[in-house]
Image (cartoon, helix red, strand yellow):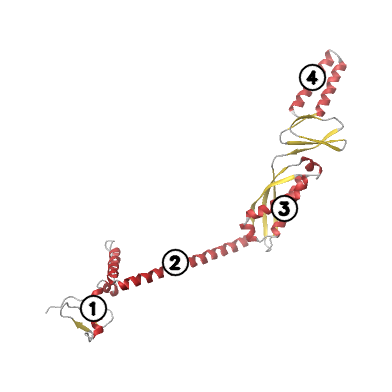
Amino acid sequence: MNPITAFLVFVLVVGGTVVGYRENLYFGIALIAVALIVATSLKMANVWQKFVILRMGKLQSVKGAGMFAIIPVLDSVVAVIDGRIQTTAFNAEQALTKDTVPVNVDAIIFWHVHDAEKAALAITNYREAIDRVAQTSLREMIGSSMLAALLSDRKDADEQLKVEIGQKTAPWGISVSSVEIRDVAIPVALQDAMSRQAQAEREKQARVILGSAEAAIAGKFVEAAAIYAGHPWALQLRAMNIIYETTKERGATILMPTSMVDSLNPSAATLALALAGNGALDGKNALEAGNGVVVPSSPRPQIAAPVAA
């Protein structure tokens, strides 16, 4: 009984009691009878409610928000339908995917009644029916999906469930707004295997990237070697820069190979090689009296101090 009807009934009962006790008994009984009629006939529906009314077993009307009256005894309210968006949680335990992997899936469905007449008359209990249909559709979807697709393509699975459930509930006057899969649980052993697989894929990708970087670096070294071959002074400046960079720290002891020392004086090494090619040097060492350069018989020349005459 709604507040307005309860207030009217209370006023009529109190008034009938007072009138019957003080004035006229029959008039007081009449007021009480009116109170009973008001209590059974005057109804009020909230803005989100729909009242389905039958008159002698047949559909009389569907009343919406506001006050309305029915005929006592002849009319009866068989259902009060809530038109707001409802939520129903459902799950599927130990359901097998297409690749025979057992999973536990939890989901939730958002729905609302768009046709109160169908929801009241076309099915006995539409709330229970929605739960059963949602669970059945979820198991069918899991059985037709691979585990990888089920884990990665959640939105596609949600849309598929929404369409399937909506098609089954539409004849009942129920619309499905959305379906959301909240959790997909897989066995612990399978989780470890998938973790190892993912780690192996990451290592593979890291090695591929490292190989590509090595190839790029090697190409740059080839380009640098071609530049240094045509410009020996550039190689000397580069060697001096390397020595400078390595001697920034105080107290550092540096061991430099002979090849690096030779690179600091490419002109002397080039002259020595040219003389050796012309046959001017023989034996292990040859002395050039003018500048005192000693050229060894090995292909790697060295620079010596000037020799006194």
Count residues near mark 1 (Cα–Cα under 10 Å), then give few for <14, some for 14-19, many for 20+: some
According to the picture, the residue beneath numbered tag 1 turns out to be 271
- Tell me the quarter of the image containing the N terminus: top right
According to the picture, the residue beneath numbered tag 3 turns out to be 164
Give the mark, 4 or 1, whose residue is nearer the N terminus.
4
Give the mark, 4 or 3, whose residue is nearer the N terminus.
4
Q: Single out the mark in the foreground, 2 or 4.
A: 2
Element type at marker 4?
A: helix
Q: Single out the mark in the foreground, 4 or 1.
A: 1
Does residue 291 appear left or right of residue 258 in this picture? left
Amino acid type, label 1: Leu
Amino acid type, label 4: Val
Q: CA distance from mark 2 to mark 3?
A: 50 Å
Does residue 281 appear left or right of residue 64 in this picture? left
Q: In the rendered structure, are the residues bearing label 3 and label 1 in contact, judged by CB atoms less than 8 Å apart?
A: no
Amino acid type, label 2: Ala
Residue at image location 24% in from the left, 74% down from the top: 267
